[in-house]
Amino acid sequence: MIERRQIIYSSLVFYFLLFVVSSTETSILAQILGATSVPCLFLAVCTYVSIHRKIWEALLFVYLGSFVLSSFSLSPWGFFVFGQLAALMAVRFVRDRVYWPGLGYFIMVYVLSIGVYQVTVSLFSLAVDENPMHGPFWWSWLFQVLWAPVVAAPMMFLMEFIDNRMKRTSEVSEVEGV
């Protein structure tokens, strides 16, 4: 019962964190950075959850987190779901084959999730949208990748601090061979 309560409280804190970083990304950083692309802070949270939680927790986080994200954008909810699910699958694929604890690994996987997310959303837009994207936004994607190492360190340490305070252990340590 206590473990279930820890999972629920930790998930609620991470949903609140997703809300805070999404609102920061769409309001404050967009005003400060102007025409350049803002970092994908929400993907840092989703990447951390994808690495350190059980698959059912990560899937639930992506699904419910997409409702939070769609409230900050004009993009349809399905774009967020499919983009994050593709990023989740890529992160889990890499995590199950190669893992080491630390910031370098988190940055690498975070950059991977940014690329997978952007390509998936672009392809999904071309496939189903009435007014699809006119092409990939190479400069925007490049700036998001360049921002990744800058924002990954504080985001990772914040999320590790939350996990330590909530007494959550990483699911990765339970994977055989790690």
Image (spheres, helix red, strand yellow):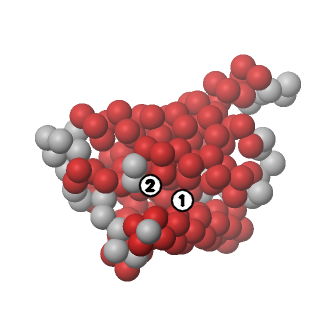
Location of residue 28 by image quarter: bottom right
The residue beneath circle 2 is: 49
- Residue 151 vs residue 82, the one in the foreground: 82
Crowding at mark 1 (Cα within 10 Å: few <14, some 14-19, many 20+)? many
Where disc 2 sits, the SS reads: helix
Q: Residue furthest front?
A: 1
Crowding at mark 2 (Cα within 10 Å: few <14, some 14-19, many 20+)? many
**Residue at image point 57% right, 68% down:** 12
Q: Position of residue 84 (x, y in %)?
A: 56, 41
**Residue at image point 24% right, 59% down:** 102
Q: In the drawing, what numbered circle is on residue 41?
A: 1
Say what amino acid the circle numbered 2 marks: Val
Kindly report which numbered mark, 2 or 1, lies closer to the viewer in this rendering: 2
Say what amino acid the circle numbered 1 marks: Leu
Q: Is residue 164 left or right of residue 36?
A: left
Q: Position of residue 178 (x, y in %)?
A: 16, 46
Where the N terminus falls, by quadrant?
A: bottom left
Where disc 1 sits, the SS reads: helix
Q: Residue furthest left?
A: 177
* Label 2 to label 1: alpha-carbon separation: 13 Å
Asked whether residue 159 appears in the rendered view, the answer is: no
Say if 50 sits above or below 160 in the image. above
Q: How many marks?
A: 2
Q: Is residue 46 left or right of residue 83?
A: left
Say if 20 sits above or below 36 in the image. below
**Residue at image point 84% right, 28% down:** 131
Q: Position of residue 145 (x, y in %)?
A: 46, 47
Q: In the drawing, what numbered circle is on residue 86?
A: none
Q: Position of residue 144 (x, y in %)?
A: 52, 49
